[in-house]
Amino acid sequence: MKRILYVFLSVVLVCSLLVFYYPGVSCQFGQEEAPIPGAGENTLSLYGIDPLTLDPAVSGEMTSHEYVTQLFGGLVSLDDNLKPTPDIAQSWQVSDNGRTYTFYLRQDVMFHNGRQVKAEDFKYSWERACDPGTGSQTAATYLGDIVGVKEVLSGESKEISGVRVIDDYTLQVTIDAPKSYFLSKLTYPTAFVVDRADVESGGEWWRSPNGTGPFKLKQWDENSLLVLEKNELYYGEVAKVNLVVFQLWGGVPMNMYETGKIDITSVYRDYIEKATDEAGPFYTDLRITPELSFFYIGFNTTKPPFDDVNIRRAFSQAIDKDKLVSLVFKGMMQQADGILPPGMPGYNEGLLGLDYDIDGARELIANSSYGDVSQLPPIAITTIGWGGLISQELEAIIQEWRSNLGVEVEVRQLEPQRFLYHLKQEKDEMFYMGWIADYPHPQDFLDVLFHTGADNNYSEYSNPEVDALLERTGVEQDNNLSLALYQQAEQLLIEDAACLPLWFGQNYFLVKPYIKGYDLSPLGFAMLNEVSVEPHWILEVN
C-alpha cells in the first residue's frame, strides 16, 4: 500500500549516515531498554521509528503506514499478486454500468474491544475522512471517485450521497464513472474502518486505537518502544507471534541485526558489500525484492526559472544518472528514464527519455527566456532532514549541476513531519522525493502526481493535453488501449520535463534463519501476522 509519500532519505538513513560519518555521534535516542511485559520466545523484534500518526484517515507516508496496516483494515486488501481480494467485505457485486458496487460484509469482524463492525461504521469512517475538519490530505485522492465526496470535502454536505447502508452488513457505493482501479484504491488506509466512539473520545485518540487489524497496540513509549500484541479476535489469519517489538531509534539497524537485537533489517548502501559478500556471515540471510517505486527531482512549475520548459529540460539533461547509480548507489538502484517502474502495468521499455547531454543542456539554457545561467534567479531544493547533513545522492546531483551548467543550488531541509505533509505549500524551486505504489496501476503515478489540481501534484504541473489523456484512459474499459494511453501520457510528461526521473528502487534486507513467513511486497510492506519465530538460541552481543 502506499502510503502516499516515500522519501529515500528517511530518518533511519539519516541516523545511519550520522553514525557512519561521525562515529562519536550516538543514535540511541530512546531510554535504556526496559523489560517488556509478556515478551518471550514468540516475539518478533524489529527496528522502528515513531509514527507521525496512527489515524488511517490522516496517515500519508510509509512510516505511519507500517503500523496502521497492522492495526486497522478495510473492505478489501491486495493479495500476493497485488489484486484486490476480500477483507472485511466477503464479496461484492458490480452493476452492469460499472458504477455501483454492493459490498457484503463478513459478520464475524470485531473491533479490538469486541464490538461488531457494521456497514454504518464504514459510512461514518469515510465521511469523517472527507470532513474538512479531519485534515486528511489523502481523502480526495483515494475516495474522490465516490459520488458526493467532493461535496463533503468542500464543506457543502456532511454525508456522502454515493454511500448507502442497505442493512447492517450491506454497503452500496456509487462512483462517478467506471474505473478499473477503484477497488484497489479502497486498499489504502484512508478507506479503513475506525470506531466512532473511539474517535469521539477526543484528543489524540489514535494513541490507543480500537482497530480491527491482526494486532493491537500494547505499548508506545516515544523514542523508545512500540509494541504490538496479537489480536485473538481477528477474523483473518491470527498472528503466529504474540508480540512485535519495534525498538524505536535503537541505533544503527545493521549493527543491531549483527548483535542479535533485531530479527530483520534493511541493508543500506554503506553496508551492501558486507551483505553481498558470499563468504561473509550475512549472505545467506540476504533477500532482494523488486519495489514499485520511483525517485525524482520535482520542479516548481509555477515559479521561475522552472516555469520555462527549456530550463527544466536543461537541468534534466545535465545529470549522469548511470554514473550516480553506479558510484553513489553501488548498483542498488536502476536508472529511470520514465516514471512508471519495471513491473508496473504500462511500463514502457521503448520510452524516449531525456539523454545526458551537457552541450544540449547548455544550448537549452541559451534558448530559454533567460539566455544565460547568470540571469537565472536564486534556486533552492527542498529535501527531508535536519542539521545540514544531506544525502550523498543529492550532493552528487548538485555537484553535477555546478560542474555541467555552472549553476549553484542551495539546499533547504524540512523536518520529516513538515516535509511529508506540507511539501506542496513549503517547497522551493525544486524538491527531492520518491513515490512508491499504493496499488499496481499507472493511474497511481501519472494521474495522482501530475494531473492538474491533484492533491499530490506537488509540482503544480498543468498540461491540458496530458489531462485529457489521463481522463480518457481512466474510464477506458479496454485494458490494452488504456495502458497505451497511459504510455502516451508518460511520454508527454517526459518530453515536457514535468519532473527529473532519477531511479527505480529495490529492497535489500536481511532475515534471521529462524524467521519464517516474512515476505516484503513490491509495495514495501509485510503483513506481520503471517510471520512466525522458530525456537532458537538467543545470542546477544553487547
Image (cartoon, rainbow, N blue to C red):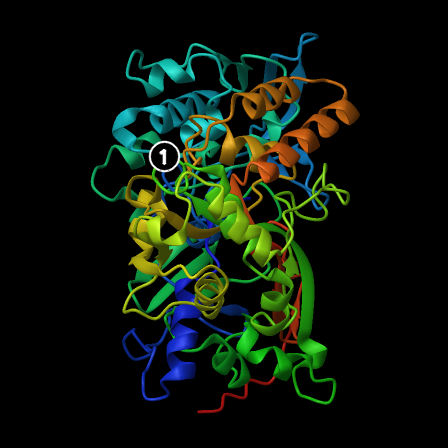
Given the image, on which type of amino acid does mark 1 rest?
A: Thr
Residue 428, x across and y down, in percent: 32, 47
* Left or right: 380 in relation to 444: left
Identify which residue is drawn at 29% across, 35% down: 199
Question: Quadrant of the image for the C terminus?
Answer: bottom left
Assign the N terminus to one quadrant of the image: top right
Residue bearing mark 1: 302
Residue 43 at x, y percent in the picture: 51, 69
Q: Position of residue 77 (x, y in %)?
A: 60, 38
Taking 290 as reference, is 33 above or below it? below
Q: Residues within 10 Å of mark 1 (few under 14, many from 20)?
A: some
Residue at screen point 70% across, 46% down: 80
- Left or right of 476? Residue 20 is left
Residue at figure coordinates x 66%, y 21% from the top left: 473
- Please give left or right for residue 369 compared with residue 333 in the image: left
The answer to whether residue 171 is above or below residue 223 is above
Q: Is residue 536 visible?
A: no
Question: Which quadrant holds residue 457?
Answer: top left
75 vs 393, nearest the viewer: 393
Front residue of this view, candidates 73 and 420: 420
| Secondary element at tag 1 | loop
